[in-house]
Image (cartoon, grey):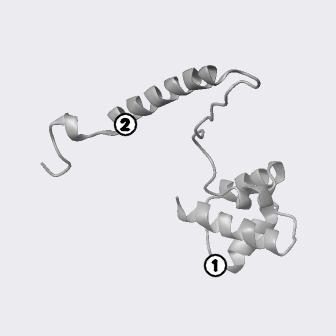
Amino acid sequence: MSIGELACTYAALALHDDGIAVTAEKIATLLKAANLSVESYWPSLFAKLCEKRNVEDLLTNVGSGGGGGAVAVSAPAGGASGGAAAAAAPVAEAKKEEEKEESDDDMGFGLFD
């Protein structure tokens, strides 16, 4: 992350926290008051981002992005218990396959070899 990007991030957060509309001019003014010089495109990029996305949503969803979670398999409603056991069998096989993929012992070398 560059200094300009970080400075504009903090400026946009400060403006949002004070309830002031986040615009390129206000970000630039805040950066100038802090004696920071950034490339001229950073304030406008952050202003456009804050215009299109809700800053509150960005703050509450920090660290929650990327990757899908595990999918739970449920037994069919009203089915016999044999059907539920058959549905559980593929799940157990999938877990075995995942464990094999995670094992690094089979590679024949270590991190510091």
Is residue 109 positioned above or below 60 on the image? above
Residue visible at 29% across and 39% down in the picture: 103
Quadrant location of residue 97?
Answer: top left
Crowding near the residue tagged with mark 1, few <14, some 14–19, many ≥20 C-alpha atoms within 10 Å = few
**Residue that carries the numbered disc 1 in the rendered image:** 35
> Which amino acid does the dot numbered 1 rest on?
Asn
- Foreground label between 1 and 2: 2
Question: Is 66 placed left or right of 96 in the picture?
Answer: right
Q: Return the residue nearer the eye: 78 or 103.
A: 78
Residue 108 image position (x, y, % from top left) = 15, 37
Residue, far left: 113
Q: Are marks 1 and 2 in contact (CB under 8 Å)?
A: no
Is residue 4 positioned above or below 108 on the image? below
Quadrant location of residue 86?
Answer: top right
Is residue 70 positioned above or below 20 on the image? above
N-term mark: 1 or 2:
1
Residue 106 image position (x, y, % from top left) = 21, 35
Residue 8 — which label? none
Q: Return the residue nearer the eye: 71 or 14.
A: 71
Q: Return the residue nearer the eye: 70 or 1.
A: 70
Residue visible at 62% across and 20% down in the picture: 83
Secondary-structure class at tag 1 = loop
**Residue that carries the numbered disc 2 in the rendered image:** 99
Question: Is 4 placed left or right of 105 in the picture?
Answer: right
Residue, far front: 81
Secondary-structure class at tag 2 = helix
Q: Return the residue nearer the eye: 109 or 70.
A: 70
